Amino acid sequence: MLSKNKRTKTFEIATHWINKDQHELLELLEKLETPFVSTVLQGSVIKEWNGKEICEHRLGMLSDLSFSEQLELACFLVKVETYCVNLEKTWDRILINKLASITFQEYINQNLHSDKVKCFIEYVVLITCAIPPDKISAFFYIFYCLSNRSLVDQMVSEKGTNRYRIKSSHKNLCERLVEKVDPNIIFFGEPVLEVGVSSKFVKVSTIYDEVNCLALIVAIPPSDLLKIKFKPKLPHTIMDSIYNTISRNVTTFIATYQEEFWRKNGFTGEVYVFDRNCSEGPIVICSGLTPEKPALVGRLYGGRPTTDKKHMYRDAVLNQLKSYFGKEALQPLDYYEKTWRENECMMPVWEVNNCEYIDCFRVPAGRIFWAGADTSFDWYGSLAGAVCSGIKAGIQVLYDMRPATLTPEDMDVLTLSKSDRRHRRTQYEQGGLSLGLYYYAASNWKKYIYSVFVLMFVLWALKKILWKRK
Ligand SMILES: Cc1cc2nc3c(=O)[nH]c(=O)nc-3n(C[C@H](O)[C@H](O)[C@H](O)COP(=O)(O)OP(=O)(O)OC[C@H]3O[C@@H](n4cnc5c(N)ncnc54)[C@H](O)[C@@H]3O)c2cc1C
């Protein structure tokens, strides 16, 4: 794309947010010499919720909530977190079935009364899962919080999920990885068509080749599995649970400029449109890139897919940007938009009553081992999930074939990731001080009530003693 001083530069149309808890991914990025940058900039952010509002920083998002609404939000966060902790400990079938039988929207409606708090949670779901909460089961979202970070960390904040961004593009990352592995043993443009499993081998057939191997790691999006002919067929639990997933098209845009004109007025470039009804344009979220590449990137509310031939949202997007940052927004050096469809890195979410999905991919199916972001128990649906699942699948293969070669650290990977998730659970204060306090208060409400009673008793006893002395 055309960038500053009319130079051509590559841009990542889907910003890849990462965070510092994603150790395996960070290690890989280091090996691939791929830097990442903080997304937290000094300046104001724009929130649309009953009209445009300018907040001094990301956490200002919550400034609108009254004390009782903040407490309601905190109680909700604690409830979700408690489910995560229980699932982590027991993976209780009764709890899973109960949560899988309703949509997350129903769960929200049952547990929240304030429209503002509901809107806030619905927005968090929309930006993390790219789908509104009425399309997913409550089980899916609670699993998502368990697998990734707690709901409080997913909220828009200085320390939340979108704390860092990979500087290089996704494509660039893949190219570096291929270089490291060995370009000669990677075949491009040869989709696998058939997989035959016998008692001794797995035969993998592409359009041009046939390869026999002892074990196969499948790392493609589960919906793509349905296009491959497996002999014998995959267990029906796997097929059924894939059928009961869904993912929405997502349209992202990028507009490049000569300079970051929005910074002159003190804006970071961030816009959060909490409620579509209060906005005239299609943007759901927007942020600015680094100074070397002045650009605004963002995501649009679902609608018709755009095409390369005609960027159908261009005028609406630029006009919306103008309403936030001024008329310079109408003059980008370059503009591009893309609709990510199902199978294009789009995380599948589980519909109501889909209880089996993640269990199906936890264990190998004979000689077939599962990897990929959408099969991962850790960091489900993200780059970090893809990396963790790949490492785990590799170790599972070795465990199956050459167990003597495994080191104690390898064995830890098969078991220890659980404790890593538990560590993440305790980081609720990451949501920021004020929310952290409410969160803490809500999770300790029994202690608080108890302390108030004790204090009242002490005061009453003191009063009695002093009264007697008089
Ligand atoms: C708009 C958008 C924004 C995102 N933002 C973030 C973010 O901020 N942070 C984050 O961590 N993640 C983000 N993601 C998700 C992230 O991109 C994915 O989770 C990650 O790319 C998944 O990696 P993967 O290797 O599991 O699958 P993929 O990247 O989907 O790779 C699977 C590969 O398998 C190939 N394949 C499919 N079928 C066959 C076949 N039959 N034979 C051979 N090959 C086949 C496909 O061509 C593809 O190359 C985003 C995704 C999108 C779409």
Image: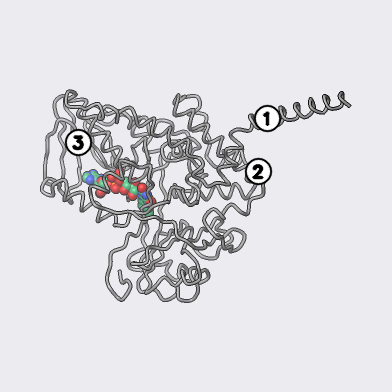
Q: Residues within 10 Å of mark 1 (few under 14, many from 20)?
A: few
Q: Earlier in the sequence, mark 2 or mark 1?
A: 2
Secondary structure of residue under mark 3: strand
Q: Quadrant of residue 167?
A: bottom left
Residue type indicated by callout 1: Ser
Residue lying at the far front of the rendered structure:
469
Secondary structure of residue under mark 1: helix
Residue type indicated by callout 3: Val
The answer to whether any part of residue 342 appears in the image is: no
The mark lying in front, picked from 2 and 3, is: 2
Q: Quadrant of residue 14?
A: bottom left
Q: How is the image coloured?
A: one colour
Residue that numbered label 1 is attached to: 451
- In the rendering, at what x and y percent does residue 447 appear? 63, 29
The mark lying in front, picked from 3 and 1, is: 1
Q: Which mark is residue 195?
A: 3
Q: Is residue 25 left or right of residue 110?
A: left
User: 40 above or below 211?
Assistant: below
Question: Residue shown at 65%/32% (left/top)?
Answer: 448
Distance CA(mark 2)–CA(mark 3) = 51 Å
Q: Which mark is residue 113?
A: 2
- In the rendering, at what x and y percent does residue 341 appear? 36, 53
Q: Residues within 10 Å of mark 3 (few under 14, many from 20)?
A: many
Distance CA(mark 3)–CA(mark 1) = 64 Å
Ligand 1 neighbours mark 3 (CB distance < 8 Å): no
